[in-house]
Amino acid sequence: METRSQQDEERANILEVQVDEAKVIAEEADRKYEEVKHSLSVRKVMENRSFQDEERANTVESQLKEAQMLAEEADRKYDEVARKLAMVEADLERAEERAEAGENKIVELEEELRVVGNNLKSLEVSEEKALQREDSYEEQIRTVSARLKEGLTNGYSVMRLYVRVAKNKLGSSQLKVRMHDCSGVTFTTNKHITVYVFVSAIVVIVVVCCERQTADELLVEKERVRNLTEEIEQTVQEIQGS
């Protein structure tokens, strides 16, 4: 009985040891289970985080592509704007050159206008002086015409006087011959050089017709004719000079 009791006690001790070992194993298993469970939880979290990171990466990549496209579009627009700006600057430079040329042309035109204005003023003054000279010439012409008319009248009077004298001193046949010698002379009142021819004809008639007058009468009449001739010559010169 004692032996069986000892065996039972030994078996109980062995069982207790096995129970203790089983407890230890169970605790170790629980710990490992918890570790595995924790690992799975961590893995799941990591997987979720990785998925989120992947989504974020995809989003960031999409945003990056969009940003690159926008940057390329911005570069293209910048190049276009730069090209247009260069064209505008070139147009502006040409416009400034044209404006400068226009200003120079305006200055030239203003100078020409000033010169033309001065010339116009000079022409107006010259025209006014010409009108004054014209009025003066017309007055001189009227004066000369009056003097010429008076001289011609005096010439006709002298001619008639000496014709009467010639009739008394010469025969009528000789007088006709003398007058025939002067028939080629044109008697006119026009204001030109034929007046001088007329006067010369008068002098010839006087000289011829007065051949038989006394010396004193001849000198007096010649002096009158000379004065008349000088007056008419002066009148003719004034007419030709004007």
Image (spheres, grey):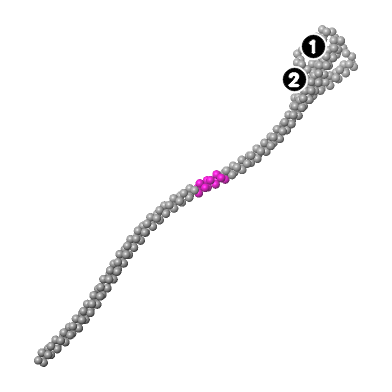
Residue 237 in percent (x, y) is at: 77, 24
Kindly identify which numbered label has been placed on residue 83: none
User: Which secondary structure lies at badge 2?
Assistant: loop
Residue at 72%, 31% (x, y): give it: 131
- Give the residue type that dot 1 points to: Met
Residue at 56%, 45% (x, y): give it: 99
> In this view of the protein, can residue 67 be seen by the observer?
yes
Against 2, residue 107 (above or below) is above
Membership of 18 in magenta stretch: no
Residue stretch in magenta: 89-100
Mark 2, residue position: 190
Residue 220 occupies quadrant: top right
User: Which secondary structure lies at badge 1?
Assistant: helix
Which residue is the extreme one toward the bottom? Answer: 2
**CA distance for labels 2 and 1:** 22 Å
Which is nearer the N-term, disc 2 or disc 1? Answer: 1
Q: Horizontally, is 108 left or right of 31 in the view?
A: right
Residue at 75%, 27% (x, y): give it: 138
Q: How many marks?
A: 2
Membership of 93 in magenta stretch: yes
